[in-house]
Image: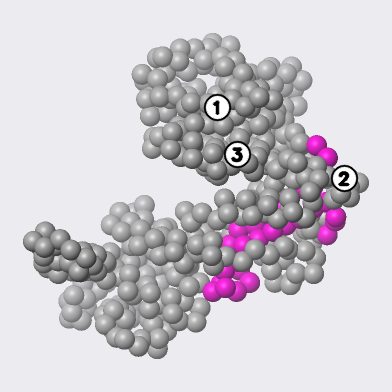
Amino acid sequence: LDEQTILGLALGCAQDGLLPIPEIQYLAYLHNALDQLRGEASSLERASEFLCAYRELDYAGRTFVFRTLANDYGPDPAALRAAAEAYLAAPDHATAKALQKAAEPRRVEVFHRLNHVHGGTQALVAIRLELMERMAHHSELWVVDDDLKRLFNAWFNRGFLVLKEIDWHTSAAILEKIIRYEAVHEITGWDDLRRRIDVPDRRLFSFFHPRLGDEPLIFVEVALMDHLPTAIDPILARERTPISPDEANTAVFYSISNCQDGLRGISFGSFLIKQVAADLARELPNLKTFATLSPLPGFVPWLQEEAARAPSLFDKDTAALLARLAAEPAWIEDPALAKAAEAALPPLAAHFITQVRDRAGRTRDPVARFHLGNGARIDQINFGADRAETAMASSYGIMVNYSYVLADVEKNHEAFIGEGKVAASSAVTRLARQAKLADRGAAKDSEPARLSPPRRVEADAD
């Protein structure tokens, strides 16, 4: 598009009430800046000006920029066609390289130039978040997101990440961000934070990237214990007696929080857990078990969806119980109802976590998918492990221990990714078989994307 065309398009949007008139000058300027970013050999000043002008735009103006990047800054069709024809006529290294270059979207060079500016990486992370917020209403923007995600996977690879232990002597700016970014078990203030990082049996580790300064990417909280925990309250308790790290035989990863929403889909967690486990094993040779105490956030949504289906997946008694649990949020306080739930829910949770998949064929629960993909083993299902309101609403209070047996991590990872094998303890495997389902065959036929074919479960000896 030339300047006159973009002015015409912007004016049309303004007349339709989609874009205020003052935005037009910025859009025209930004379009010219995009062209110059793509063409100039030295463009740091222009890139800085682009980012400043972008920040002046409102929601509609930024959407217009994203749509321009999607529609007008892909590969040049004529150049791509010519390169493809040249390769087909003479397939060699030179023509393949030319084809690869021609297939590269022109917006990628824009992103590279913006990344060179001071603060440009952080700006692009923020821009991607704004882009993702619009994708539900502008389906064409996925191509822009795909390019940014590909670049971020390269820019934020493990080689560039710096692992730091966060303690009470870490800068207040970083500690404040840890409080704000904690996404699993809320940190209620400075005293709560101190209980998590300033005692001998608690640790917190975070990944940082040199281009993002003191912005943490992801962090994990670790409890050093002498047993595998079955509930979260004892770990977070205000009043407890710390143990010496030398007395601990178990490292429990009880909270993992991603900090940058603009980096959603860029995997740091697998690197973080494995490196922290390896570092702790070197520091404390007495540690024999590395495990999580993890939520099961997809469990209740799945139960409710299946309970609403016809025919129901569950037998009559289980369906009646689930209806009562859904109708009575405080059911855990009713001893009889809690006892019935304790008998029925863990087998269903074991079935859910080992067998149920989403429509894309992936393990349905996102936390399970994360840990199984990292090579962990499902070790234990814990009823009543987290009675916080949010946990009861999403998982009926069930939490899961995933074990990271360092010698088996790579084997489990390859089996899960390549063959769909789920590593689980024999106790979890037996529990899954106890799930009271009405008619598994009928359920498979009615919703194949969710329940068939079943996951192969590799049961380890207890």
First reached walking from the N terminus: tag 3 or tag 2? 2
Q: Amino acid at mark 1?
A: Glu
Q: Quadrant of residue 32?
A: bottom left
Q: Position of residue 270 (x, y in %)?
A: 57, 50
Which residue in the protein does label 3 denote?
Answer: 408
Which residue in the protein does label 1 denote?
Answer: 458
Q: Is residue 231 above or below residue 325?
A: below
The image quadrant where one finds the N terminus is: bottom left
Task: Judge from the rendering whether residue 360 lies leftward or rightward of residue 398; answer left or right.
Answer: left
Q: Quadrant of residue 217?
A: bottom right
- For image coordinates 59% across by 42% down, the residue present is 409
Q: Which residues are magenta?
A: 198-227
Does residue 170 show up?
yes
Does residue 12 show up?
no
Label 2 SS: helix
| Pointer 1 with pointer 2, Cβ within 8 A | no
Residue situated in front as seen by the camera: 53 or 381: 381
Q: Is residue 313 magenta?
A: no
Q: Quadrant of residue 109?
A: bottom left
**C-alpha gap between disc 3 and disc 1:** 12 Å
First reached walking from the N terminus: tag 1 or tag 2? 2
Label 1 SS: strand
The image quadrant where one finds the C terminus is: top right
Q: Amino acid at mark 2?
A: Glu
Task: Judge from the rendering whether residue 2 lies leftward or rightward of residue 47; answer left or right.
Answer: left
